[in-house]
Amino acid sequence: MEVVLIGSGSVATHLGLALQAKGISIKQVYSRNVSNAEILSKKLDAPFITDISEIYMDADIYFYALTDSAFKSILRKIDIPKGIQVHTAGGIAMKEFEGFTSNFGVFYPLQTFSIDKPVDFSQIPICIEACNEEVQEYLLELAKLLSTKTYVVDSEQRKKLHLAAVFACNFTNYMYDIASKILNDSGFSFEMIQPLIAETADKIKTLSPYDAQTGPAVRMDEKTISKHLIMLNKRPDLKKIYKLLTKNIYIRHKKN
Amino acid sequence: MEVVLIGSGSVATHLGLALQAKGISIKQVYSRNVSNAEILSKKLDAPFITDISEIYMDADIYFYALTDSAFKSILRKIDIPKGIQVHTAGGIAMKEFEGFTSNFGVFYPLQTFSIDKPVDFSQIPICIEACNEEVQEYLLELAKLLSTKTYVVDSEQRKKLHLAAVFACNFTNYMYDIASKILNDSGFSFEMIQPLIAETADKIKTLSPYDAQTGPAVRMDEKTISKHLIMLNKRPDLKKIYKLLTKNIYIRHKKN
């Protein structure tokens, strides 16, 4: 199997490494950024290009691991005769490929990646979508090679997964960021709260988040809440977040 | 050492179990709720009372693991001659004990507890505060018996820890809850997003939350953001949260 990676960010990196670990060598890496292209090229022991017109034309599969706008711009510039073209994004509809190629699909790993943090790809849910049965079979087989968790998910459904992921990952990480700021401003290290973060994430493996909810908001402990709001007087942005989330948690648990 | 637990909720339960595991037997459990008192009494093989006037008077230490309002109400009803009285709350100042006893302090485990979910107490940061050096020494020794992570933290600082914990745990769990709702409404199981949640929590062991931030907000991917906002049109409450957090993440990463 010949693979071309279009992109050199965290998704391209970990996808490339996962493929390589399964014995699939990467034929070529493209990135418009020379230094990023070089770094990934070294990691994968694969040649790189920075000019998209030099793309290798006879690969079996092309992975677009790009931001949404870069994806559309690159797609316009490539005319691949035969290989399957897939993107790896949660939020881009498959139909964006229409008119550019007849062999296409989506290969969306539902995970957060940072370039230098290793991940266990076998535990990552991979969501597949394809333009026809044949391509779907091909993508599903590839996904099963990399992960024990594979799903066929259409664009509409994938958008919902992506939205859920923004809450579960991006917004959650921002909560950690705020906690980190409060701790650092008070002379504590962020490490002190890491067991709490680990346990909060661990809990929902055996309890629903609804049942796992604790804290002043769910027990409507007004005294603690008003103390906290006073402490946030100098950070009206965080105070606004505290108030809004507290109100929502309260309503959520009062109603049910 | 003779211990009395005042309260039968999740903190009392896990503290009691942790003490018991270290060979310290619980002399008595108090709860105004008979059935909760019975359950904990069985778990700890300790007698229970539901009338606070029957409290055992000669224990070495009394743990108040109660909500803030219950704490103050019970404190008024007890007159312990000698034993050390401590509460386990993040948000209650130590000085609340003043006038009721001369041997007091705080024994605050910085963790989230659910009654039926076992925890590894040895990894829980325990924050100690005491009315004098002697009590501090006693509490610190007890804390070190239970955990490898012990700290001396005054009431003002503990309030800040507690505030950080609300963001890192309670609000984070609410983000999971929202994600769970979106998934269930779309026919997906919550399990599908658990690897993402686990990785998000794992990441910040090696990256700062600032550096770990990913998602449409940090890269100001307006197209994805506006798609998500449209998807949330039927849930104005969640839309408001999405907008506020997105704006804050954007500003946070633009400035720095």
Image: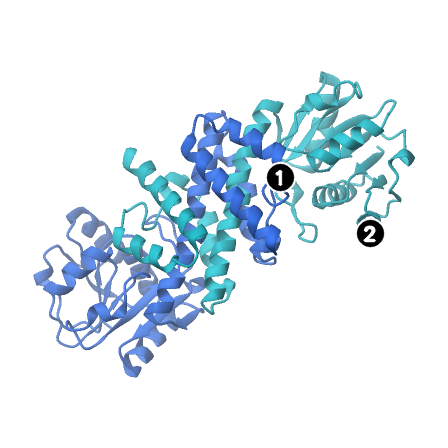
Chain colours: A blue, B cyan
**Label 1 residue SS:** loop
- The C terminus of chain B appears in which quarter of the rendering? top left
Q: Are marks 1 and 2 in contact (CB under 8 Å)?
A: no
At a point 31% along the width and 50% down the height, the residue shown is B216
Residue A195, percent across and down? 56, 42
A29 relative position to B209: left or right = left
B45 relative position to A199: left or right = right
Q: Residue furthest left?
A: A53
Q: Is residue B132 above or below residue A105?
A: above
Q: Amino acid at mark 2?
A: Ser
The quadrant in which residue A92 appears is: bottom left
| Total marks placed | 2
Q: Is residue A210 above or below residue B53?
A: below
Residue, disc 2: B35
At a point 19% along the width and 56% down the height, the residue shown is A70
A180 relative position to A219: left or right = left
The quadrant in which residue A119 appears is: bottom left
Tag of residue B132: none
Q: Residue furthest bottom?
A: A133
Inter-mark Cα distance, 1 to 2: 28 Å
Q: Earlier in the sequence, mark 1 or mark 2?
A: 2
Q: Between B253 and A227, which is closer to the camera in this rendering?
A: A227
Residue A194, percent across and down? 52, 40
Residue, disc 1: B124
Q: Is residue B143 above or below residue B228?
A: above
| Mark 2 chain | B
Q: Amino acid at mark 1?
A: Ile
Can you see residue B9?
A: yes
Residue A178, percent across and down? 44, 36
